[in-house]
Image (tube, grey):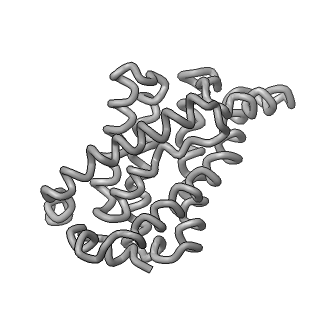
Amino acid sequence: MNSLRKEFTTTTLVLIPVAIAINIAIGHTIYTLKLPFYLDSIGTILVGVLVGPWAGALTGLLSNLIWGFTGLNPVYAPFAAVAAIIGLCAGLATEAGLTNAWWKSILTGLVVGLIAAAVSAPISAYVFGGVTGSGNDALVAMFRSFGASVLPASFGQGALTDPVDKAISFLLVWLIVQALPLRFRARFPQAQAAKG
């Protein structure tokens, strides 16, 4: 309970909506352009890194639910649990000292990307038949043409794209944290652990 109280300060409650807006703005742009990655977790990772795992998880969860249920992109709502896991992982990785250097952030992103791929594949396969309308649908089709069923094809697509996507996202968050003024960073419980 102390951990939750420490994470959910007034500053955090102001940061979470900003992070949700970042997720939706960047993610929607990438989705619309049909690029083969997402970059829709930058705000979630930022909150996880600066504040902690529970605030990161809540940010991811709310981002996808808001994004999906407002009609901007209904595809995102079923992936809310995946987004929450990404935020949770970002916070836990920072607590473990795995985001305080650029190369650690990239490696952490690769691992979190594999976790995201494993969790999202069944959702993609069973809710959408492997076709979500993103730029990655061509990879699912490619794996299907090789004879893979929809679940392995969905996981194959995720295993190829999610680690790269999350590595880029974690690196961008590391760069953002390094650029934040010391006085601003001091407002967040995990900011010092994330500073290189």
Looking at the image, which is closer to me, 77 or 18?
A: 18
Q: Residue at x 66, y 32 (%)?
A: 135
Q: Residue at x 48, y 73 (%)?
A: 98
Looking at the image, which is closer to me, 2 or 6?
A: 6
**Furthest residue toward bottom:** 196
Assign the C terminus to one quadrant of the image. Answer: bottom left
**Furthest residue toward right:** 146
Q: Residue at x 44, y 22 (%)?
A: 74
Assign the N terminus to one quadrant of the image. Answer: bottom left
> 139 above or below 52?
above
| Image location (x, y in percent) of residue 53 | 33, 59
Looking at the image, which is closer to me, 151 or 128?
A: 128
Relative placement, left or right, of 35 versus 73 is right
Q: Residue at x 55, y 60 (%)?
A: 109
| Image location (x, y in percent) of residue 50 | 32, 65
Quadrant assignment, res 128: top right
